[in-house]
Amino acid sequence: MKLAGALIAFASLATVIAFIAALSGSKDDLPGDLRSCVKRGDAVIVHGQANLGAARQEIRAKSLTKLRTARRGDDTIILMAGQRFRLMVLANDTSPTLAGDLPKRLYEHADEFPLVAIEVDPIKGVLGDCIGIVGL
């Protein structure tokens, strides 16, 4: 009986140790998780104006529609739509402000955000799905 009790205690301790190790070994990498999802889905990571392609005209015309906003801690994701594309931005406390003319700010300073991505002809809904996959 003492042996069975000792085995149960040992198994419980091993479970707790494994759980703690798993939690300490994992980290919240929202930018990395989103970036991986975007690449797997064949959307494009935006590094500057050249990556925006046809979206540039609609950004200049201020004709984008905000579809979704999601937050996790200090991170905010905004999904916007143009006529033939979706644009996603991930911002955190070190990013430029999201207030005001965000499309223009993305056009001029995309490289200052942790992640900006574009999906042209968004039939598959890659960017929207990526937001859902990371749990937002």
Image: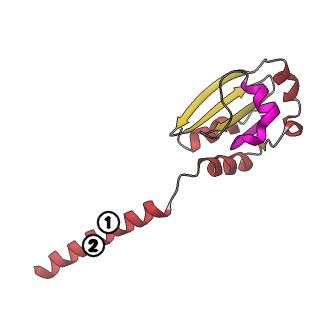
The label number, if any, that marks residue 11 in the structure image: 2
Q: Earlier in the sequence, mark 1 or mark 2?
A: 2
Query: Where's the C terminus, which quadrant?
Result: top right
The label number, if any, that marks residue 16 in the structure image: 1
Q: How is the image coloured?
A: secondary structure
The structure residue drawn at horizontal position 56% and vertical position 32%, both measured from the top left corner, is 70
- Is residue 126 at all visible to an observer of this figure? yes
Furthest toward the left, the residue is 1
Question: Residue 63: x percent and y percent?
Answer: 78, 17
Task: Give the crowd class for mark 2: few <14, some 14-19, many >=20 residues within 10 Å.
Answer: few
Amino acid type, mark 2: Ala
Instruction: Label 1: state its secondary structure.
Output: helix
Task: Give the crowd class for mark 1: few <14, some 14-19, many >=20 residues within 10 Å.
Answer: few
The label number, if any, that marks residue 73 in the structure image: none
Q: Is residue 127 above or below residue 37?
A: above
In whole angstroms, how far apart are the C-alphas of marks 1 and 2? 9 Å
Tell me if 108 is positioned left or right of 16 in this view: right
Question: Residue 127: x percent and y percent?
Answer: 68, 37
Can you tell which quarter of the image residue 17 is in?
bottom left
Furthest toward the bottom, the residue is 3
Q: Is residue 36 above or below residue 20?
A: above
Q: Would residue 88 be counted in the magenta stretch? A: no
Question: Residue 85: x percent and y percent?
Answer: 78, 29
The structure residue drawn at horizontal position 69% and vertical position 35%, both measured from the top left corner, is 89
Tell me if 24 is positioned left or right of 121 in this view: left
* Magenta region: 102-121
Of circles 1 and 2, which is in front? 1
Query: Where's the N terminus, which quadrant?
Result: bottom left
